[in-house]
Amino acid sequence: MSERLQKILAQAGYGSRRACEDFISAGRVRVNGQIASLGGKADPHVDRITVDGKPIAAPERLTYIALYKPRNVLSAVEKERGDDRRTVRDLVDAPGHLYPVGRLDFESEGLVLMTNDGDLTNRLTHPRYGHEKEYRVLLARRPDAEQVEAWKRGVILEDGYKTQPVNVRFESPQGKGAWMRVVMGEGRKRQIRETCKQLGLPVVRILRVRIGELRLGNLKAGQWRALTPHEVDDLKGKPSRKTTNRR
């Protein structure tokens, strides 16, 4: 059965549908020797589909992994030549074309979802679905009420972008600093760090503890585990299998 190429590529482990659309737009995808175009369809069981000249593999078994990314690890699958830094893929001893969902910068730590499910990746990263991400942020000094209110309302960053309103609250003191709890629906690159820079609040540590309904739980830095079917259903917005089985 013919399906859109970006869906086929996503199911074969090449990333989200949006990432696969970029492959197609760049002319990296061919169907039966012809350069593919956006909107094109193919049958992976009949047509020969290649990316950069290499045939795509048969769709993989979908895998979902929760990882505690330590600090100073790249949220990437591949790195530039000569870069000896570890990536999140180096930490997960599991087969398949797994890739991280969403951003977590090099200096930050915490929950990263690794998967080969392009549809779920699109759901978790597309703004229209509004999946929250929750962080614990350690500041070198305690913010005053005015700084917290400005953070909540949204801050204009150096590039002129105004951040969306976020949920920010004081959690606990830490010496001269403070742990803050931050819940946000968007995820621009280094957004928390850039926001705090504009507010004059030095960041010591950023720890992501939740993506949507998925929580970091008891994982330690560098540890990972497979998601339960219930957790996968929650992320996909499906009725819980536990609930369904009780009916």
Image (cartoon, rainbow, N blue to C red):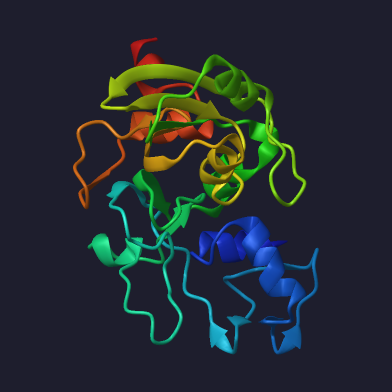
- Identify the residue at horizontal 54%, vertical 49% (top origin): 190
- Identify the residue at horizontal 22%, vertical 63% (top origin): 93
Q: Is residue 165 above or below residue 189?
A: above
To which quarter of the image does residue 72 belong? bottom left
Quadrant holding the C terminus: top left
To which quarter of the image does residue 47 belong? bottom right
Q: Is residue 136 above or below residue 33?
A: above
Side (left or right) of 14 relative to 149:
left
Is there any visible trace of residue 116 in the rendered image?
A: no
Instruction: Name the one closer to the observer, 134 or 192.
Output: 192
Query: Could you say where residue 167 lies in the image, as x and y percent from the top left?
Result: 55, 21
Query: Could you say where residue 204 lies in the image, as x and y percent from the top left?
Result: 36, 42
Instruction: Name the one closer to the observer, 139 or 208.
Output: 139
Quadrant holding the N terminus: bottom right
Instruction: Name the one closer to the observer, 179 or 68.
Output: 179
Q: Is residue 48 above or below residue 122?
A: below
Side (left or right) of 203 relative to 86:
right
- Identify the residue at horizontal 38%, vertical 47% (top origin): 112
Residue positioned most to the top: 247
Side (left or right) of 13 relative to 112:
right
Query: Could you say where residue 18 lies in the image, as x and y percent from the top left?
Result: 67, 58
Side (left or right) of 98 relative to 184:
left
To which quarter of the image does residue 84 belong? bottom left
Query: Could you say where residue 225 lies in the image, as x and y percent from the top left?
Result: 24, 45
Is there any visible trace of residue 108 in the rendered image?
A: yes
